[in-house]
Amino acid sequence: MTFRTALRLAGLIKLAFLAAVIIAGGSGVAAAVPAAAPATAATNAADDSPMPYVLDARVVGDANRVRFIADTSAPLNAAVFALADPYRVVIDLPEVKFVLPDDAGSQGRALISAFRYGVISAGKSRIVIDVTGPVAIDKEFTVPAADGQPARLVVDLVPTTREKFLASVQAYRDTHGAPDTGAGAGAAAPTGDDSKPLIVLDPGHGGIDSGTRGADGTQEKDLVLAFAKVLGEKLVASGRYRIAYTRTDDTYVSLGDRVKIARDQHAALFLSIHVNSFPVGNVRGTIVYTVSDAASDKMAAALAASENQSDELAGVDVKAEDSDQVKDILLDLTQRETRNFGLTFAQALVRHLGRSTMMFKVPHQEASFKVLEAPDVPSALIELGYISNPDDEKQMQSPEWQDKVADSMVGAVDGYFHKETASTDP
Ligand SMILES: [Zn+2]
């Protein structure tokens, strides 16, 4: 048996194990691996080019030099670059399967504080390394499999000054353009009759950005996608609405692109779907948010800050994106009206949801969520419940709960459109 065959077999065994975990109802990283993976790998066993996988990733070294090493099933073509504020090093790869333990990347070493990995856009994967300060990418290379060792991707980082770091960020952008933001990935075109109002459903996070995580490993990105699909099907089944999603699979979509999808398609309503987390106490319940420059309270401000981090976590250059924002008086007026419609919708949501599930003691709150900033699309964000609370976590995964809560939300959408029509009719 050649080493290559042995490695492939080891990978197959690992994938088969993951499939068993999925069947047994496990989650975490396992859930991110498509259930069809073992079959695909098996079918491709005779093929020379199956989708490569990352088998292990680790950090060695000290404060003078730190080395990130990924063991891979084949040598990978990588683009390595840095991003500032916060300091990050990004490794862009062709699409790979990550077969790593649940907690991989959660603990760093020396100059590296953590790393994340996942799909960034169709056919592309990404690893984002958080670094504790300005670093220089001193070496990056790949090693083919040899002497019983798998192929490797190696990136060496050494400390540098902020000035040199920023210069390297700029130099990379000048030669390569702005890094991939996963633009428009996963957006599904609306279906049905154009005369019906279009509602854009926005399942939060996705791909490299998992969102928050429950005690039993449930990931926000999976939970909110499942719920969005339940809600979307009900809205379509009503025969009164068209539906589009910002993502329909485990792909990352930047916050700006989520807003753009709604604006470009002239959506009548935008609903971002998330789940909450609070480490202290037994906080639970549903909260509906609308956008405001002043947050309801500290907790709302902290939540918005954490949800707004999505692009940073995914290794997107936020500064480059913000530069083309336009502000004028007409836009301000439109925005004020849009915010009022968003508020009306949020109030309808709170009213209807109160009949089917437990609401947080302050069920409607405000904060500056980036994803709610479309000046011309009424928008709201729902935190379905607290994944940090075992009761909420269990309940949000139950089809019965999803069903009744989605029914209430359809009622709120009906109420909103009825009311909106009534109030604009002379
Ligand atoms: Zn979220």
Image: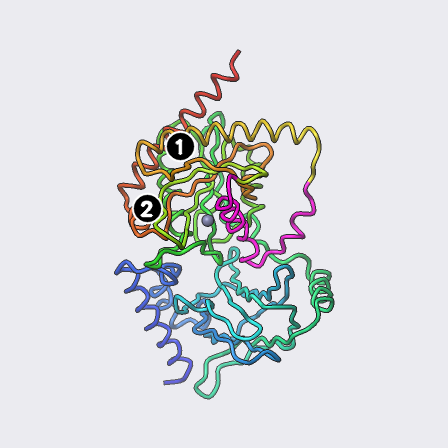
Q: In the drawing, does residue 371 fall left or right of residue 404?
A: right
Residue that carries the numbered disc 1 in the rendered image:
350
Q: Compared with residue 253, is residue 266 higher up or lower down, i.e. above or below?
A: above
| SS type, badge 2 | helix
Residue that carries the numbered disc 2 in the rendered image:
396
Cα separation, mark 2 vs mark 1, equals 17 Å
Q: Residue furthest top?
A: 426
Q: Compared with residue 252, is residue 343 higher up or lower down, i.e. above or below?
A: above
Is 323 covered by the magenta stretch? Answer: yes
Span colored in magenta:
296-325
Q: Are marks 2 and 1 in contact (CB under 8 Å)?
A: no
Three-letter code, disc 2 = Met
Q: Compared with residue 290, is residue 111 higher up or lower down, i.e. above or below?
A: below
Q: Residue at x 46, y 28 (%)?
A: 193
Q: Determine crowd level at label 1: few under 14, some 14-19, many 20+ residues with C-alpha closer than 10 A.
A: many
* Residue 411 pos. (x, y %): 36, 28
Q: Residue at x 37, y 81 (%)?
A: 6
* Residue 130 pos. (x, y %): 56, 65
Quadrant where the N terminus sits is bottom left
Q: Residue at x 64, y 76 (%)?
A: 158
* Residue 344 pos. (x, y %): 48, 27
Please tell me whether the stretch drawn in magenta is mainly helix, strand or loop. helix
* Residue 9 pos. (x, y %): 35, 76
| SS type, badge 1 | helix
Quarter location, residue 166: bottom right
- The colour scheme applied to this rendered structure is rainbow
